[in-house]
Image (spheres, rainbow, N blue to C red):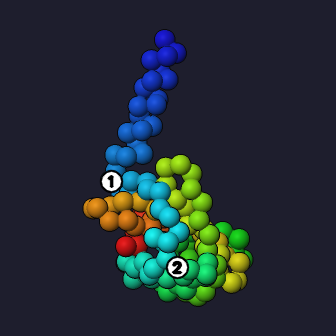
Amino acid sequence: MAVPAVAVLLVSGCYASTDYGRYPEGKLVQNAALVRTWAGEGAELALKENKVFSAAGLTLKYFSCPADGLRNKSGDGTWSSIDDGDSTSVLIRFEDGCTATMWTGESEGKTVLWATTEDENQVLTLK
């Protein structure tokens, strides 16, 4: 009986992660393809070749800040990327130490950067 229960949990876990359509399908992206200006929903993030970025109106959940949590930030900092086998994560660190993670994905045939903002029901997508 344990095997069917595990199978149901695995199937339902996969279903939950793809059912809503608000999370773009994960995508591996080379650094050269990340270097550009990403924009959407009143936000802009310019990733540059020398691993620096500039951002305007970027509303995300931030960590390592004096007040962690959802914030609208503009400014400069550094970025790096990490591949997990299914997608590429982009880690950004503002000069004030606030950090956030965005993921690469594909939506409507285009590569996007995305992150949840306040909770898992709200997603910021930059194209």
Can the viewer see residue 103 in this picture? no
The quadrant where residue 36 appears: bottom left
**In the image: residue 21, left or right of residue 4:** left
- The amino acid on which the numbered mark 2 sits, given as a three-letter code, is Leu
From this view, report whether residue 109 is shown above or below residue 64.
Answer: above
Q: Position of residue 107 (x, y in %)?
A: 32, 61
Q: Residue at x 49, y 77 (%)?
A: 35
Q: Position of residue 5 (x, y in %)?
A: 47, 21
Please name the residue that numbered disc 2 is placed on: 47
- The amino acid on which the numbered mark 1 sits, given as a three-letter code, is Gly
Please name the residue that numbered disc 1 is placed on: 21
Can the viewer see residue 8 in this picture? yes
**In the image: residue 122, left or right of residue 65:** left
Count the numbered circles shown. Answer: 2
From this view, report whether residue 111 is shown above or below residue 1.
Answer: below
Tag in front: 1 or 2: 2
Q: Residue at x 61, y 74 (%)?
A: 79
Is mark 1 in CB contact (under 8 Å) with mark 2?
no
Q: Position of residue 111 (x, y in %)?
A: 38, 65
Task: Choose between 68 and 88: the one closer to the eye.
Answer: 88
**Tag 1: Cα neighbours inside 10 Å, few (<14), some, or many (≥20)?**
few
From this view, report whether residue 118 is shown above or below residue 75.
Answer: above
Q: CA distance from mark 1 to mark 2?
A: 26 Å
Q: Circle 2 — which element?
A: strand
Task: Choose between 49 and 7: the one closer to the eye.
Answer: 49
Q: Residue at x 37, y 77 (%)?
A: 40
Q: Circle 1 — which element?
A: loop
**In the image: residue 66, left or right of residue 27:** right
**Tag 2: Cα neighbours inside 10 Å, few (<14), some, or many (≥20)?**
many
